[in-house]
Image (spheres, coloured by chain):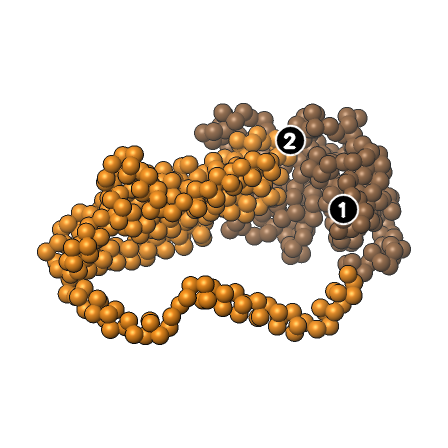
Chain colours: A brown, B orange
Amino acid sequence: MTIECHQVQTPYAPSLNRPILNGIDCEIRQGEFVALLGLNGAGKSTLLRSLVGLVPIQRGEIRINNVAITPRNLPQIRRDVGLIFQGGGLIRQLSALENVLCGRLGELSTWKTLWGFSKHDRRHALDLLHQLGLKDRAYQKTGQLSGGQQQRVAIARALIQSPQILLADEPIAGLDVMAAKQVMDILAELHRDRAMTIVVVLHDLSIAANYAQRAIVLDAGRVVYNGECTNLESEFAQLPARSKSGL
Amino acid sequence: MKNIAEFWRRYPWINRLLILGSVILVYGWALRGLKVDLELLKNSWPYVVDFISRLWPPDLKVLDIAVEKLIETIQMSVLGTTIGAIISLPIAMLSSRNLSPVWLQWLANLLQNAVRSVPSIVLGLLFVAATGLGAPAGTLALGIYTIGYLGKFYQQAIEAVDPRSIESLQVSGASPLQIAQYGILPQVLPLGLGYTLWMFEYNIRAASVLGVVGAGGIGFELVNYIRGFEYTKATTMMLVLLVVVTAIDALSSKLRQKLEAM
């Protein structure tokens, strides 16, 4: 499953005096682990959100496996793409298990889920939580879990959809070193064992270099670097000084 | 424009002085408009003391009537709050900016404002005319009165829902009803139940006022005793109401604390 962005442009944002995405051109191939990098306001999260149709596109085109994203085929495309939101995007009042089961909603009819989920679905969700080391937290409300545990619940929720592409928006933001490593190791494992395409927004250049095969650096809504992760610090040093002051 | 902004930045005390001046003007305007006569208030103090002294001691012979009418008041509040809560929920959903299109929000908000601007006494009179004297009229009046407030409270609770959690369900392909059941309801429920409890408590007091126009409850007896100059009996009614309102307030505060922690 490839992701192709051709001259992607979002509507004009008055707060930035420009569109958030201002002509993005990039391609991510099947089974790649890509880090999206850039300063605050560069458009990293917006690019990720536009890949699942959460941000309207004014110009250009996004193609997932050669199919252009349109409102009509969005449900089909979303079946193959999982998105882990910044902070997890979980429902704090629901248990970890219920949050993971929410990832199945798109596959089941409203009538079927009115009275809950099937035993099969619950078993599958418990298996995923077990794989991510959260089996003993399955019935705990997610609001009571630590940041790292919440991120793992969010990963489990994305995985229950069996996506071929996994997008993660700053999955280690606010986590301690150990929790961050645990989350990144899980993503690396998914990439290695299931050949899943992983696109992750990061702020830490060394983590990007450790885990990703390729880095895409954004600045002011454009791709300014697209290549190996070996020399990221010097790439960042070349970003315009005005953007750096926004850090 | 830039010069004006620079001026306000250089002299922030002028801004504060203007705000203080505006506050004084508003209060002065309100006091002048109401023609509050402080001299008259000072002279009327003996009459107030005389009235209060006639309320004492409470006549406990009417305690059984007071308890019976109080139970009726609580029943009115339970049913009225429930009717109001059921009707408020869809109206709140239609008024919420994160769920409805602007035109629907506008219409639903207009409906809420229209209901809120009708005093409970007027609603009481309306339903007394429709169903006759007694508790059913008061219950219906409370039900409609509740919509004006719970509709707004529920709307605020819905608008406070974490937008990312809703987007995450959208991305997983959930239908609008599934999003409502699994995304919105769990987040709104604790806050919504807290507001409903507060409204129930408030409606007990509101039901007492509705009795004045013959819409049942303890207020009906209370007004009759005051009109008949039987002040000591009226005191018994007020004391019973005070005890129950205080108990319900304490109980619902505890419940609300638990709900907020959910």
Amino acid type, label 1 = Ala
Give the side of residue B249 with respect to residue A90, left or right.
left
Q: Is residue A227 left or right of residue B120?
A: right
For label 1, the residue is A13
Q: Disc 2, disc 1: CB below 8 Å? A: no
Please state which of the two labelled residues, at mark 2 or mark 1, is closer to the viewer. 1
Q: Is residue B45 above or below residue B145?
A: below
Residue A59 visible, this orientation: yes
Which residue is at a point 81% across and 60% down the rendered structure image? Answer: A245
Label 1 crowding class (10 Å Cα cut-off): few <14, some 14-19, many 20+?
A: few
- Seen in the image, is B149 located left or right of residue A55? left
Q: Is residue A207 visible?
A: no
Q: Could you tell me which residue is drawn at 79 percent across and 32 percent down?
A: A62
Q: Nearer the viewer, residue A5 or B228?
A: B228
- What's the amino acid at mark 2? Ser
Q: Position of residue B118 (x, y in %)?
A: 41, 45
Q: Secondary structure at mark 1?
A: strand
Chain label for disc 1:
A
Q: Chain of mark 2?
A: A
Give the camera-side residue of A232 and A90. A90
Quarter placement of the N terminus of chain A: top right
Identify which residue is drawn at 85% across, 44% down. Answer: A223
Give coordinates of residue B44: x percent, y percent. 28, 71
Q: Nearer the viewer, residue B186 or A131?
A: B186
- Which numbered disc, 2 or 1, marks the residue that appears first in the sequence? 1
Which residue, given by chain and number where applicable, does mark 2 sit on?
Answer: A162
Q: Which label sits on residue B44?
A: none
Name the residue located 87 percent from the left edge and 54 percent from the top edge: A239
Q: Nearer the viewer, residue B1 or A55?
A: B1
Q: CA distance from mark 2 to mark 1?
A: 35 Å
Q: Dot 2 lies on which element?
A: loop
